[in-house]
């Protein structure tokens, strides 16, 4: 079984490298088109993930028809395909190419203004649009490399390869499994930590309402933010029809939660609900740009 796993991991890493080699010469439009084809193939081949996506969408949008649900489900696989293709290539992008690819508007000014407070920043996003690109480019555009919290892949060779892409221009990565202490160190230095807060957390974390259902959500973001008064910026790279991105960044204000008479646990839950609801609002506008194939609601709260 161990040998079988090693062979499978080797083959999948080889496929990644082949896809990267093929797609590197592509123009952004060609890469987007190829990513859509890759996503369509994945949608047809990955039956279990397709079922999860359709089931999640059906429960999140009961008002939508089966045809609408299937169209969004296909779109979410294609979004993932495009994101992978762009991740494989982004370490080769020049600054000029990045500026043409993603428009931050006044987002970088916001980041620089918040950094002046000297408390660091929790840069919060989700598996939406191209989350890899926004984390990669923030450090470049703000002229300050950031630290990205990642979930290690079981395939160690693929994990190493992906992290090489993420850190090609100076960013650092840390494992989500031992992140808390390192996050504190980074933000105390006035730097930026990038996290994704939309994966299914453990039963011991917090259940908050997400698309009408209780979803186990990591409490570390709210816990650290409240404990050390760390500013939170929510950021999303929204794919446009021409394959470029508009980055929407905004500060998540939570001073009212800090000032409330609630106990610590209730404050953590209130802040967790707030950032989860902001993510939900963005997903509702662009449902095909979120990773619905993830088992976001796999845990049930204890009765």
Image (cartoon, rainbow, N blue to C red):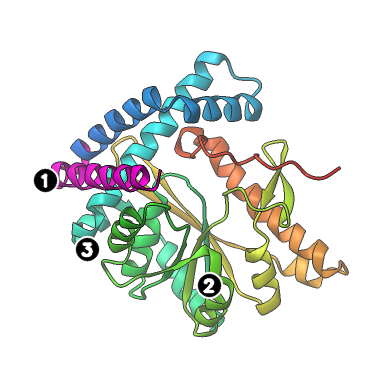
Instruction: Report which residue position mark 1 lands on.
Output: 25
Disc nearest the viewer among 1 and 2: 1
Q: Residues within 10 Å of mark 1 (few under 14, many from 20)?
A: few
Q: Looking at the figure, which quarter contains the C terminus?
A: top right
In what element is the residue under mark 2? strand
Q: Residues within 10 Å of mark 2 (few under 14, many from 20)?
A: many
Above/below status of 281 relative to 131: above
Camera-side residue of 10 and 205: 10
Q: Looking at the figure, which quarter contains the N terminus?
A: top left
Above/below status of 187 relative to 9: below
The mark nearer the N terminus, 1 or 2, is 1
Residues at discs 1 and 2 in contact (Cβ within 8 Å):
no
Which residue is farthest left? 25
Judge from the rendering whether residue 79 lies leftward or rightward of residue 15; answer left or right.
right
Q: CA distance from mark 1 to mark 3?
A: 17 Å
The mark nearer the N terminus, 1 or 3, is 1
Judge from the rendering whether residue 277 lies leftward or rightward of residue 109; answer left or right.
right
Instruction: Report which residue position mark 2 lands on.
Output: 121
Q: Determine the image quadrant of residue 137.
A: bottom left
Q: Determine the image quadrant of residue 29.
A: top left
Camera-side residue of 77 and 247: 77
* Residue segment shown in magenta: 1-29
Residue 176 lies in magenta, yes or no?
Answer: no
Instruction: Report which residue position mark 3 lands on.
Output: 95
Above/below status of 286 relative to 256: above
The mark nearer the N terminus, 3 or 2, is 3
Q: Residues within 10 Å of mark 3 (few under 14, many from 20)?
A: few
What residue is rendered at 45% in x and 24% in y? 47
């Amino acid at each position: 079984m161990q040998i079988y796993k090693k062979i499978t991991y080797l083959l999948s890493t080889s496929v990644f490298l082949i896809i990267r080699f093929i797609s590197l010469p592509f123009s952004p439009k060609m890469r987007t088109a190829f990513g859509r084809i890759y996503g369509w193939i994945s949608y047809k081949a990955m039956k279990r993930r397709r079922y999860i996506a359709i089931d999640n969408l059906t429960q999140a949008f009961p008002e939508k028809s089966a045809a609408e649900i299937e169209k969004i489900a296909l779109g979410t696989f294609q979004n993932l395909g495009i994101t992978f293709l762009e991740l494989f290539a982004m370490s080769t992008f020049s600054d000029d190419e990045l500026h043409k690819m993603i428009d931050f508007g006044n987002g970088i000014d916001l980041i620089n203004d918040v950094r002046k407070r000297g408390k660091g920043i929790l840069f919060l996003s989700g598996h939406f649009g191209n989350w890899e690109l926004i984390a990669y480019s923030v450090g470049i555009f703000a002229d300050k490399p950031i630290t990205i919290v990642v979930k290690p892949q079981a395939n160690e060779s693929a994990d190493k390869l992906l992290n090489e892409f993420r850190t090609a221009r100076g960013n650092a990565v840390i494992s989500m499994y031992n992140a808390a202490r390192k996050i504190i160190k980074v933000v105390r230095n006035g730097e930026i930590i990038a996290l994704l807060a939309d994966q299914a957390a453990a039963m011991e974390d917090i259940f908050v309402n997400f698309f009408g259902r209780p979803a186990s959500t990591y409490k570390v973001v709210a816990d650290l933010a409240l404990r050390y008064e760390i500013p939170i910026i929510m950021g999303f790279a929204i794919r446009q029809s021409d394959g470029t991105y508009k980055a929407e960044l905004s500060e998540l204000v939570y001073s009212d939660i800090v000032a409330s008479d609630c106990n610590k646990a209730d404050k953590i839950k209130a802040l967790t609900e707030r950032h989860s609801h902001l993510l939900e609002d963005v997903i509702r506008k662009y449902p095909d740009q979120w990773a619905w194939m993830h088992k976001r609601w796999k845990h049930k709260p204890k009765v």
